């Protein structure tokens, strides 16, 4: 089985700031969400956990594993999508004409990334390589895998596996600390 989970909440989530690759830790609410998820999913067998190295995901992964003997492996291909110069911007939707909003409102039109940002093509390339090199071989061995990551990055994996078109990129939604079974 392949499962995916988004990290617990952070102060920037609460302030509606774009995090991207900015390494923001979980807040107390996010840690409690992870603890609650660990209890809820304690009976789900996991052979390995892959996580983004960003603090908010890595800490969530550690809390989910708890005292179970599950290896946790960080992989840089699982970092969040880079939002470039817009990381740290609060309430981007309240800024008229803010270019990064195209990514969220009309993803099919986000063909050129914002300054210093990442394109969907780059995101899909790295997460696709991760799936091909790390995940699929373990699935053929019958392993149960959890990926702990981020909203946009996780959706690149979900949408790839489910063949969801780019125009519907955000349609699945991904709540903090909810386990989603993919395969």
Image: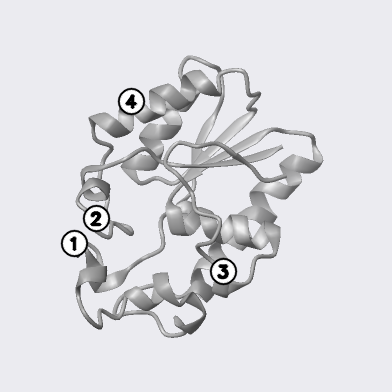
Secondary structure at numbered mark 1: loop
Point out the tag, 4 or 2, that comes first from the N-terminus: 2
Point out the tag, 4 or 1, that comes first from the N-terminus: 4
Give the percent coordinates (x, y) of residue 77.
49, 56
Residue on which the image places disc 3: 168
Disc ID at residue 6:
none
Q: Is residue 72 left or right of residue 60?
A: right
Marks 4 and 1 sit apart, C-alpha to C-alpha, by 24 Å
Q: Nearer the viewer, residue 35 or 51?
A: 35
Point out the tag, 4 or 3, that comes first from the N-terminus: 4
Quarter that holds the C terminus: top right
Marks 1 and 3 sit apart, C-alpha to C-alpha, by 24 Å
Point out the tag, 2 or 1, that comes first from the N-terminus: 2
Quarter that holds the N terminus: top right
Q: Is residue 163 left or right of residue 156?
A: right
Residue on which the image places disc 1: 90
Marks 4 and 3 sit apart, C-alpha to C-alpha, by 31 Å
Marks 2 and 1 sit apart, C-alpha to C-alpha, by 6 Å
Point out the tag, 3 or 2, that comes first from the N-terminus: 2
Secondary structure at numbered mark 2: loop
Residue on which the image places disc 4: 32
Residue on which the image places disc 2: 16
Q: Is residue 25 left or right of residue 144?
A: left
């Amino acid at each position: 089985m392949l499962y995916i989970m988004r990290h617990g909440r952070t102060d920037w989530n609460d302030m509606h700031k774009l995090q991207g690759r900015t390494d923001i830790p979980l807040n107390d609410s996010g840690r409690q969400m992870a603890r609650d998820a660990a209890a809820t999913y304690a009976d789900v067998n996991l052979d390995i956990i892959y996580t983004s190295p960003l603090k908010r995901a890595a800490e969530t992964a550690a809390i989910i594993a708890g005292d179970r003997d599950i290896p946790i492996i960080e992989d840089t291909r699982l970092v969040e999508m880079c939002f470039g110069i817009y990381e740290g911007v609060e309430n981007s939707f309240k800024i008229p004409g803010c270019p990064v909003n195209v990514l969220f409102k009309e993803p099919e039109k986000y063909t050129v990334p914002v300054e210093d940002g990442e394109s969907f093509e780059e995101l899909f390339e790295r997460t696709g390589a991760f799936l091909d090199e790390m995940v699929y071989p373990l699935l053929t061995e019958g392993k149960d895998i959890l990926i702990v990551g981020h909203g946009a990055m996780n959706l690149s994996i979900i949408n790839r596996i489910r063949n969801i078109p780019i125009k519907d990129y955000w349609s699945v939604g991904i709540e903090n600390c909810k386990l989603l079974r993919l395969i």
